[in-house]
Every structure is written in C-alpha cells, then in structure tokens.
Amino acid sequence: MRNALSIDLEDWFCVYNLRGVVEKQDWSKQELRIGRSTRLILKLLSEHHTKATFFVLGWIAERVPELIGEIEGHGHEIATHGYFHTLLTEMTPQSFEEDLKRALEVTRVCTHQEILGFRAPSFSITDKTSWAFEILERNGIRYDSSVFPIAFHPDYGMPTAPLSIHKVGELLIEFPLSCVEILGRRIPCSGGGYFRMYPYLLTKSLLKRCNREGRSAIFYFHPWEVDSKQPRVKLSWLKRWRHYYNLDKTLNRLDRLLSDFEFTSVKEVLGL
Ligand SMILES: [Zn+2]
C-alpha cells in the first residue's frame, strides 16, 4: 500500500513551540538553516526513489525561492503551509484568507505546478475553525491535511473526525493525520514529535496496523527535525523536550522508515 510522505517546509525558528521566544518580526535576523537540512532530506528521498509533498511556508518561499525550485526539480509536490505560520485558532476567517492568498501568491512564482494542497500551522483546523474548509475550496485548494483526529493535545485536534480520507466540501478532500484506534483510544502514528519520541518499532507497528486496516497513512516531519546543531533557545522543560528530543536520530529513522514502507506524494495517493 502506498502511503503519503509530507514535509512542512519551515525553519527552526518558525515553530509554534518557540512562540514568545523568537518573535515573527525577528525571523529575518535568525540564522537560516533550512537549505542545508532540506538538501539532506532531498538526498535521502533520492536514495529511496521516493517522492514527497512539501507544504511550503510562504515566508520561506519568499526568502529562499531557489530552494523551492530545487525541490520541484527533484520531482516533488509543492503545496502550501500558509504565509506566516499563524494558527487558525488565532485568526479570523478574513485574516486567514489574506494569509492564504499571500502564501499562494509568493509560492506560485517559485513553481510550475498547480498548488493543490494545504496544511494548517500546528494542525489548527479544529471544530472551532472548520470555517476554513470553505475558504480553502474557493481559493482552488483540492485537499487539506490539517485535521488531527485526537482529543488529548492542548493545541490541536478534532476528536470526532473520521480516521480515513473523506470529503469536507463539494470537491475538497481531507487527508487526516494518521492514527490507529486501540481499545477505544486514538494513537497517532504520523510523524513529527511522535516519531522522535516513540521507539522506531512502535511507529512501524502502528503504521503497519493502519495499512492492514486498509488505510494509506500520511506521515510528516520538518527540516529542523534533522538538524541537531540548530541554535538552542531557552524554553520550558516540556517545550525543550518536544523540540529537541532525538533530533540526532531522525535521519537514520527516516532511512529505516523509507526502507520499510512505500511512500509517495499526497496528490499521487489521492489520485489528483
Ligand atoms: Zn508548521
């Protein structure tokens, strides 16, 4: 079974976990490390003959347009992650649409592809922000992958959303972040911090279970998660653990993951 591989293309300082430590107006003063870490990912994907979807942050596309061209040159899908990494739960429908339009505008000039996909910063399409689906659809987006169908996370989650790919508009498709249900509990198996915190074999067995249930999984990670030498900022222990734990192991684990499962871009899995 083919699974979808996705990379949220943002640098180490764009992360919601670092809010209040590195402010948006100071982003341009930070050391850009995304080129190096993205090239490590591109190399790994080439070695495994694997295509992926890159959800590009508009601010990054504007800053390093040549990197987006390079990703496209490797045959990967370019999608959008919004412009400024503001959570939908902190925006109005109007400011979200402005952010989306700006992201599409600056990303379209870097790619020859039609941009079909969207992922919200920190999976922030929740029951309170489901107004976003209509806005995505009228801006030409064909699929969304922002819904995390879980109940336990303080920042995101749509606890009653289906676990499988489903329609959320006339044409708009939702590819929810992959979870499996065990004894009535939904356990994420879709990457990011979960991938760094679980032992590799746990991720592997959960993904296998997802595939056995007849569902293609969607897996995500970020370039900063393969960059163990990124600048360290002062964070609470919980945030420090979330952001820095096992960064030095991610690339090797991804190598194993790409050997153990078949992955491709989201649009390929959805047949778009
Ligand atoms: Zn993000």
Image (cartoon, grey):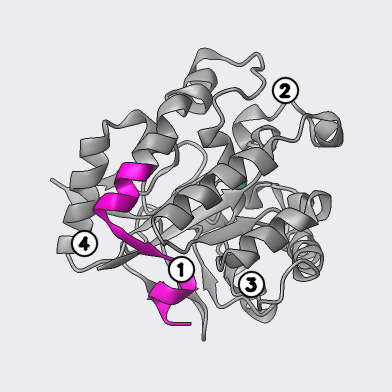
Q: Quadrant of residue 26?
A: top right
Q: Using the numbered discs, state the Cα–Cα distance from disc 1 to disc 3 in whole angstroms.
A: 17 Å
Residue at image point 40% right, 29% down:
249
Q: Secondary structure at mark 3?
A: helix
For residue 92, above or below residue 203: below
Q: Earlier in the sequence, mark 3 or mark 2?
A: 2
For residue 253, above or below residue 38: above
Total marks placed = 4
Tell me if 52 is positioned left or right of 32 in this view: left
Residue at image point 67% right, 41% down:
34
Q: Is 76 included in the stretch rendered in magenta?
A: no
Kind of residue at badge 1: Val
* Residue 98, percent from left and from top: 80, 63
* Residue 102, percent from left and from top: 81, 63
The residue carrying mark 3 is 136
**Are circles 2 and 1 on residues that touch, CB within 8 Å?**
no
Q: Secondary structure at mark 4?
A: helix
Marker disc for residue 21: 2
Residue at image point 52% right, 47% down:
41
The residue carrying mark 4 is 211
* Magenta span of residues: 255-272
Marker disc for residue 266: 1
Tell me if 131 is positioned left or right of 83 in this view: left
